[in-house]
Image (spheres, rainbow, N blue to C red):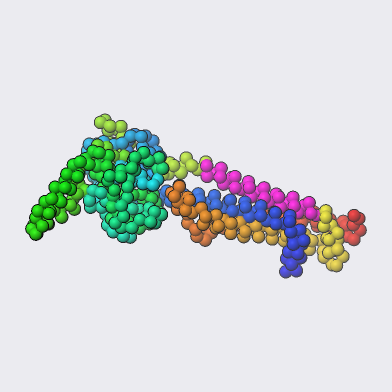
Amino acid sequence: MLLIKLATKSLLNRKASALLTLFTIAISVMLLMSIERVRVDAKSSFSNTISGTDLIVGARTGDIQLLLSSVFRIGHANNGVSWKSYQYITEQRGVKWAIPMSLGDSHKGLAVLGTNKDYFEHYRFAKKQSLSFSQGHEFNHLFEVVLGAEVASSLGYQLGDEVVIAHGMGNTSFHNHDDNPFKVVGILNPTGTPVDKTLHIPLAAIEAIHGGHAHQHEAVQADANDHDHDHDHDHDHDHDHDHDQHDDVDLIGTPKQITAFLLGFDSPLYTLQVRRNINQYKDEALLAIMPGVTLRELWEMLSIVEKILLLFSIVVVLISLLGMLTSLLSSLNQRRRELAILRSVGARPWHIFTLISVESLLITGLGCIVGIALFYALMLLGADYLQSHAGISLNIALLSSYELMLLAAIMVAGFIVGLIPATRAYFYSLADGMSIKI
């Protein structure tokens, strides 16, 4: 305890250099922890985005490009899939369910997805968790929209609000469909996936807002309304009208093409068979990918980047520890009188050795503590940005066993670095005694 007290007082006497060294170690620890946490959480966020889907089918591009554009809303597909091909493939033996997806529109920089009710029934994320509603329900009529949790919270939308869709992805929207606003009828629970940042509208509405069948929709609505007015007290007609309105989503036909679609099968054997058939499909250049396999390919591609980032942060840690070594060595000459006085009052050479070692451990330990505090501050500040711009959901939890192991490695490295000036001080104290001349 006496040595720790002496080491603390000695560091306080050299505040400027000690604080600078401590701050350098803290920054390097923050960097190392941040890179590690983002790496792990990025992998987890991407892996949790889609679950229980056997195949993703789109135009023939690259496996990873199709995965990123259809599931993660990163980039966009250059071509689509014709509705005829979609119908043909979904009628194949073994297909249990299919979810059509049409992308290309946006709202205030957020993706708009045209799909059908099968999306809410069959889409799975994380460990086969299904989508659920915090408010409202799925769309039943043509101009209705279901919002992801983050869309509703960031833009402050409530049930019954009207939303105007724009043509074009992201912030580069070309045309607002002001004449066809969508009514918010449902808000989904948070999933920690791109679903949270997506507006979901009926597939038929995509065709309607782009002029395909808008006039037909208006005519249907007008006829229905007139009919309802003329038979105000006819219970049977009211029932029919309600039924028509309920199926309004399917009244307006289908789009000429979609961006991609998801498939689920009764058996893995069908998955491989249908995948081979799709990739050899003659009527259209299509590509079918297995999301789990493609995700692994993506991480293999990014593994070199992970290693470079980890190496970079380790180098920064080593540089900060070398800075501490330089600081301790440069102060030794100035402290020879101090060490000689300690020897004169009974300190032995190994006491001097331990004192310098404790100083290096104190600087390293305090640097790690400040670094962890900075790491959590950075995580809290950057969590929303990474979620909205990269789709990475940061887990602001206690340090993992691997992260604690990294900290332990830094402490050990700090101790080893501290042995060099400690050994030098040991021999100084032996040689100098009280005969030091300045």
Taking the spot 61% from the left edge, 56% from the top edge, the residue there is: 371
Q: Is residue 393 visible?
A: yes
Residue 176 in the image: state x and y as whole percent: 33, 42
Say left or right for 379 vs 156.
right
Taking the spot 30% from the left edge, 43% from the top edge, the residue there is: 177
The outermost residue toward the bottom is 1
Say left or right for 241 vs 99.
left
Instruction: Find out whether residue 318 is within the magenta segment.
Output: yes
Residue 430 in the image: state x and y as whole percent: 85, 58
The outermost residue toward the top is 282
Q: Is residue 84 above or below residue 364?
A: above
Say left or right for 85 vs 165.
left
- The N terminus - image quarter: bottom right
Instruction: Using the image as rendered, state which of residue 85 and residue 378 is in the foreground.
Output: 378
Instruction: Using the image as rendered, state which of residue 326 and residue 281 is in the foreground.
Output: 326
- The C terminus - image quarter: bottom right
Instruction: Find out whether residue 330 is within the magenta segment.
Output: yes
All told, the count of numbered labels is 0
Say left or right for 410 vs 277.
right
Q: Is residue 83 visible?
A: no
Res. 106 image quadrant? top left
Taking the spot 15% from the left edge, 51% from the top edge, the residue there is: 225
Residue 242 in the image: state x and y as whole percent: 15, 55
Residue 422 in the image: state x and y as whole percent: 76, 56
**Main SS of the magenta segment?**
helix
Res. 26 image quadrant? bottom right
Taking the spot 62% from the left edge, 52% from the top edge, the residue there is: 27
Q: Which residues are magenta?
A: 305-332
